[in-house]
Amino acid sequence: MSVVPYIPAFLSILGGISMVYGLYLWLPEDTEFLDKLKNVLLLICVISILLVIVILVFILNKTNQLRFSGNSLGKELTSLTQKLHHFRNIVDILVRSKVWAPGLKEYIDDEFGDLNFFAMKEFYKGRSKLALEYIEENNRYGDSENLYLEAKSLLLNDPANSKVDTFTNPRSYSPRILKKWIEHKCGSGIWYYFGYKYASYKDELDVNRIFERHQEKILSYAVQLDTHRYQDMGFSEELLSKLGEQMSEDIIPRLFTLTMQSHQRVPRVINFAISILIILTVFGVFLPILTLLFQIPLIFGYLSIGIVLSILLFITLSIYPFVVKEINTER
């Protein structure tokens, strides 16, 4: 919904133009009229100053609201980011572990080392010949090679990359990589292969092949990620499945949503209020003062009167729908 109510804005502009036109054409320029015009300009200046103060208070109030919500948003962003860090640490252990069928990692890393999981999923776009070759040779390891590519994609910080030379958790995740993970449901493969279909893939993905010290690290990261959910669970394929489900269905989508909110610009209502503030300051304060002090052409005085009164008309006509919108927004 637009910040500017179009009908009040149209009526206000039309009223302001009509007023300036009428004052310019029909009012005389004798001494008595000039005295009255000075009084009117002084009144316009006072009204403008009062409106400027009201708008400044409104802007400061909105800014404080945004600061408060920003603090809450920042805390949740930090929490979700840390959870994703723990999950990626787990995925890093899985990628380096012996859970994979013998020869699978060598096959993917040697033959398809430059293949990006996202490019593979988008093979139908024809952007990657390597992706098409991979699709033709798929299922050598019971389809578990797809999971290996997906796991490596979760260690990327940039969706344009294909290799994970040095895995590091960033301070914050870019919307681009989060969007790609969501688009291709990254994490759901871990949920699927180690959950619903684990009996079918047990030979290709045997969790018992993971070293015990690595199992302990995975369990430790899982408990840090969500103590309530994982503190009573031992290491198993069920643990990995639940981690993949939580990431793909909850953590990553929520982190993306909050990240996009944190990247939003100043709300339009504040930009609009600042615009009115500038117009009032220029045409309602400085222009009347200049007209009175330097006796510049009367058209500038008429312009000042027309603009300030049109802003007053706009505020009067649009205040009710604005209040209703604000109340509904706060619910």
Image (cartoon, rainbow, N blue to C red):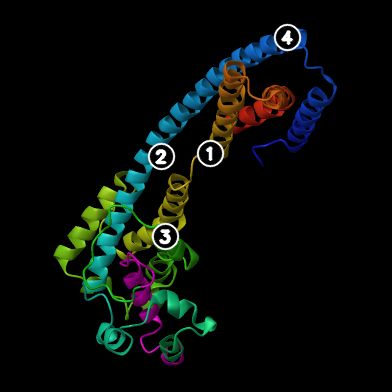
**SS at circle 3:** helix
Residue 230 visible in the shown view: no
Residue 121 visible in the shown view: yes
Residue wearing tag 1: 267
Q: Distance of mark 1 from mark 3, alpha carbons?
A: 24 Å
- Between circles 3 and 4, the one closer to the viewer is 4
Residue wearing tag 2: 73
Mark 3 or mark 4, earlier in chain: 4
Which numbered circle lies on residue 178?
3
- Please state the horizontal and vertical placement of residue 248, each as a whole percent of the image: 43, 59
Q: Image quarter for residue 325?
A: top right
Q: From what the image shows, is residue 2 above or below residue 84?
A: above
Q: Image quarter for residue 189?
A: bottom left
**SS at circle 4:** helix
Q: Decide: few, some or many residues near mark 4? Use Cα within 10 Å; few <14, some 14-19, many ≥20.
A: few
Q: Distance of mark 1 from mark 2, alpha carbons?
A: 16 Å
Amino acid on which the number 4 mark rests in the picture: Lys
Amino acid on which the number 2 mark rests in the picture: Leu
- Between circles 1 and 3, the one closer to the viewer is 1
Amino acid on which the number 3 mark rests in the picture: Leu
Q: Distance of mark 2 from mark 4, alpha carbons?
A: 55 Å
Which numbered circle lies on residue 53?
none
Extent of the magenta region: 135-160
**SS at circle 1:** loop
Depth order, front residue of 156/230: 156
Q: Quadrant of the N terminus?
A: top right
Mark 1 or mark 4, earlier in chain: 4
Q: Distance of mark 3 from mark 2, alpha carbons?
A: 17 Å
